[in-house]
Amino acid sequence: MKAGLPNEDAPGVYDALPFLIANTKQVMGLEELPEEPFINTAGLNVVVLGGGDTAMDCVRTALRHGASTVTALIVWMS
């Protein structure tokens, strides 16, 4: 899902579901697909936009794969 933010199509910016699917496939030893490449977060500083279940799955996955830091940016709207 796109948020309409500047640079959301820049290199290093990924959608949640392809990230989660590719990481699960990598852990299970399944084939990597071009539309769902494995994104190695080891040693990276990761920022996750969103605060729902999928965002928290991305946070945990990045940490599990060795990210140096993971920051979740959550905007609460009333």
Image (cartoon, grey):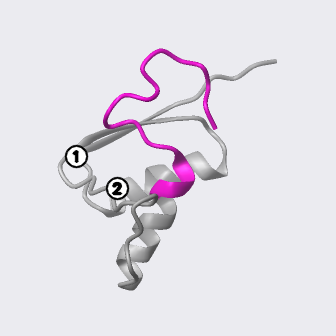
Residue 66, quarter of picture: bottom left
Q: Give the labeled residue for mark 2.
A: 63
Q: From the viewer's perspective, is residue 3 above or below residue 60?
A: above
Magenta stretch, overall SS = loop
Whether 70 is among the magenta residues is no
Which mark is on residue 68? 1
Q: Secondary structure at mark 1?
A: loop
Which portion, as a residue range, is magenta? 1-19
Residue sticking out furthest to the left: 43
10 Å neighbourhood of mark 2: few (<14), some, or many (≥20)? some
**Eyeballing the image, is 38 above or below 31?**
above
Instruction: Name which residue lies at 51% across and 65% down.
Output: 21
Q: Relative to 24, is 17 on the left or the right?
A: right
Query: Identity of the amino acid at label 2?
Result: Leu
Q: Position of residue 27 (x, y in %)?
A: 37, 78
Q: Nearer the viewer, residue 39 or 76?
A: 39
Residue 19: % across, % down: 46, 55
Q: Which mark is residue 54?
A: none
Screen quadrant of the N terminus: top right
Inspect the image, locate mark 1, and give the three-letter code of the amino acid beneath it.
Ser
58 left or right of 37?
right
Residue drawn 45% across and 49% down? 59
Please say if 6 is above or below 9: above
Disc 2 on helix, strand or loop?
helix
Residue 49 place in picture, x, y as percent: 52, 33
For the point 26% across and 50% down, the residue is 67
